[in-house]
């Protein structure tokens, strides 16, 4: 038996209805975009339920569906225990420590926070890093691949253009309200379709207990099969949660910090359940390939999608595809909005138009959204190593803003403008230097999809992976902060507060 | 049933029931949102 997606006419109707409803929501809320705060921060009126929907759906896209399931397919339950679980710890830290601090002032974006503590220079570096991080390359690429799995005659670029174009259209119309309201529908779709799919997959292939004998024992050891140092590197990627621009935007858009905290705590439960289902699906997909139920050529990162499509009957396939598209559209729309804000509100406004009004900011931010979508699309189909591109984007963001943000929010001692600037610039530049050096000195590693530089020192052999970048750039950023704090002049009052007074 | 299967079934229930409950509370808030606090 080999795989072919069972797309019947009812599946096409489901997909068309889903896309039409998303566009309708964008059109409906477009009439209430009366100010930049309405467009960019949903009037700062988001309640706990809508925050849960938008946080859960925004933060989980094809990187989880493809990435976590691929790790489970190759290594087993370490995908949940080693890769997913550390992120919940960072979300708990964010819920109890970060949310309250970020709500003490009327910030609009992540660079806004740095502008308050360190002035324009640090804020522009942060906006650049946030813009690079928020480009929707991985999402558009994943969406093209998903479309190609279900519609084999559809070129992935056309699929990304079509489905990604819908996400762009409703975001341009309704800003964060359209983003958040479509997120609620997408949240239900992505959760319910996976919850329906898993029992059907288990009924066709058996449960994890049934297939355990067909897999290496390490598959069912929480950290089995993967070196501890690699698990630490996986865990460190969770640091980006503490400086996640779309996450910050939702904290600023919430009605209160209690809404944010409650949403995150409930969200962790849902993320944990979603991750476990994806992990179990990846493991079952491997057994299906081993037993010839799925073709041997099935790529590990498409295994979950393939095994679910195999198990679902016509009608449900369309709903599942809508759920997968929903997971990705909810991510693309949010990051396009953040990146558009970075270009206009965080870079153009302070440098060229400090007195720009609401209408001008809203109009230009829409152009910023189009720019980020177009740039993301070009990068998505230009780079061959999309996962490596995403790791680079995440590294740039964390390296640039983690130290100055945490110092600004929690360090009670002396802070200088120069400290913020050197911390941002040091992290940004050292991360880029590390990447350039590693790509010149190292070699691609196909097994892990990364770059590794192996060298001998004192008779022993060492390996540097590109994923280690933050272990170099974060100390450089911290050193920049300390040097700037010694050399710079103390800030009596935050610059942004002076400017707005 | 193995403990991993039990975890899978718990996850399925949490996902299905949790998302429907959250959506129900969202619908309760929707009226206020469409009409127009640290």
Image (cartoon, grey):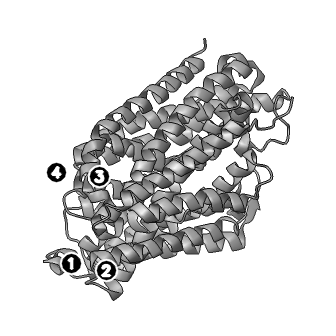
The reply to whether discs 1 and 4 touch (Cβ–Cβ < 8 Å) is: no
| Whether residue A165 is situated above or below residue A194 in the rendered picture | below
Q: Disc 3 versus disc 1: distance between alpha carbons? A: 22 Å
- Mark number, residue A98: 3
> Which is more toward the observer, A248 or A236?
A248
> Crowding at label 2, few (<14), some or many (≥20) Cα neighbours within 10 Å?
many
What is the distance, in whole Å, between disc 4 and disc 3 at their CAs?
Answer: 17 Å
Parent chain of label 4: B
Residue A434: image quadrant is bottom right
- Furthest residue toward bottom: A352
Gap in Å between the C-alphas at discs 1 and 4? 25 Å
Of pointers 2 and 3, the one earlier in the residue sequence: 3
Residue at the top extreme of this rendering: B1
Residue receiving disc 4: B37
Residue to which mark 1 is pinned: A495
Is residue A395 visible to us here?
Answer: no
Q: Which chain hosts label 3?
A: A
What x and y, as percent, mark residue A462?
67, 58
Residue A20 visible to the viewer:
yes
Pointer 1 with pointer 2, Cβ within 8 A:
yes
Quarter of the image that includes the C terminus of chain A: bottom left
Secondary element under disc 4, as helix, strand or loop, is loop
Residue A40 rendering spot, x and y as whole percentages: 34, 64
Label whose residue precedes the other's in the sequence (3 or 1): 3
- Left or right of A58? Residue A416 is left
Taking the spot 73% from the left edge, 22% from the top edge, the residue there is A205
Mark 1 and mark 2: Cα distance apart in space = 8 Å
Q: Which residue is mark 2?
A: A120
Nearer to us of marks 4 and 3 is: 4
């Amino acid at each position: 038996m080999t795989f072919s997606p069972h797309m019947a006419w009812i599946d096409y109707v489901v997909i068309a209805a889903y896309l039409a409803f998303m566009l309708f929501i964008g059109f409906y809320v477009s009439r209430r975009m009366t100010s930049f705060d309405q467009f960019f921060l949903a009037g700062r009126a988001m309640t706990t339920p809508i925050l849960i929907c938008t946080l859960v759906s925004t933060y989980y896209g094809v990187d989880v569906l493809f990435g976590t399931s691929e790790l489970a397919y190759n290594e087993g339950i370490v995908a949940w225990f080693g890769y997913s679980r550390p992120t919940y710890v960072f979300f708990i830290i964010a819920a109890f420590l970060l949310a309250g601090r970020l709500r003490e002032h009327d910030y609009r974006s992540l660079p806004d926070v740095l502008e308050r503590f360190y002035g324009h220079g640090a804020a522009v570096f942060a906006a650049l890093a946030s813009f690079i991080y928020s480009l929707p390359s991985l999402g558009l690429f994943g969406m093209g691949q998903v479309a190609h799995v279900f519609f084999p005659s559809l070129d992935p670029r056309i699929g990304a253009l079509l489905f990604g174009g819908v996400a762009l259209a409703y975001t341009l119309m309704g800003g964060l309200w359209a983003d958040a309201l479509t997120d609620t529908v997408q949240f239900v779709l992505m959760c319910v379709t996976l919850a329906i799919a898993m029992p059907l997959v288990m009924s066709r292939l058996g449960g994890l207990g049934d297939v355990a004998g067909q897999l290496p024992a390490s598959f069912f050891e929480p950290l089995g099969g993967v070196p501890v140092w690699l698990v630490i590197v996986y865990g460190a990627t969770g640091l980006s949660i503490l400086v996640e621009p779309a996450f910050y935007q939702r904290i600023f858009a919430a009605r209160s910090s209690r809404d944010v905290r409650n949403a995150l705590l409930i969200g962790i439960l849902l993320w944990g359940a979603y991750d476990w289902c994806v992990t179990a699906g990846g493991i079952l997909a491997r057994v299906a390939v081993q037993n010839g139920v799925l073709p041997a050529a099935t790529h590990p990162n498409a295994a979950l999608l393939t095994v679910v499509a195999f198990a679902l009957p016509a009608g449900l396939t369309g709903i599942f595809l809508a759920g997968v598209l929903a997971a990705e559209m909810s991510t693309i729309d949010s990051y396009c909005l953040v990146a558009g804000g970075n270009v206009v509100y965080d870079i153009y406004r302070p440098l060229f138009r400090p007195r720009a009004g609401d209408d001008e900011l809203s109009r230009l931010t829409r152009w910023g959204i189009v720019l980020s979508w177009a740039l993301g699309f070009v990068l998505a189909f230009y780079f061959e190593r999309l996962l490596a591109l995403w790791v680079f984007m995440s590294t740039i963001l964390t390296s640039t803003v983690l130290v100055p943000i945490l110092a600004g929010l929690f360090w009670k001692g002396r802070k200088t403008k120069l400290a913020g600037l050197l911390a941002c610039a040091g992290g940004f530049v050292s991360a880029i230097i590390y990447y350039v050096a590693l790509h010149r000195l190292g070699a691609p590693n196909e097994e892990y999809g990364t770059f590794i530089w192996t060298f001998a020192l004192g008779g022993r052999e060492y390996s540097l992976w590109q994923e280690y970048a933050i272990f170099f750039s974060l100390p450089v950023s911290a050193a920049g902060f300390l040097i700037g704090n010694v050399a710079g002049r103390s800030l009596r009052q935050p610059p942004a507060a002076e400017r707005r007074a | 049933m193995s403990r991993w299967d039990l975890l899978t079934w718990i996850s399925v229930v949490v996902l299905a029931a949790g998302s429907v409950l959250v959506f129900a509370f969202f619908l309760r808030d929707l009226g206020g949102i469409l009409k127009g606090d640290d």
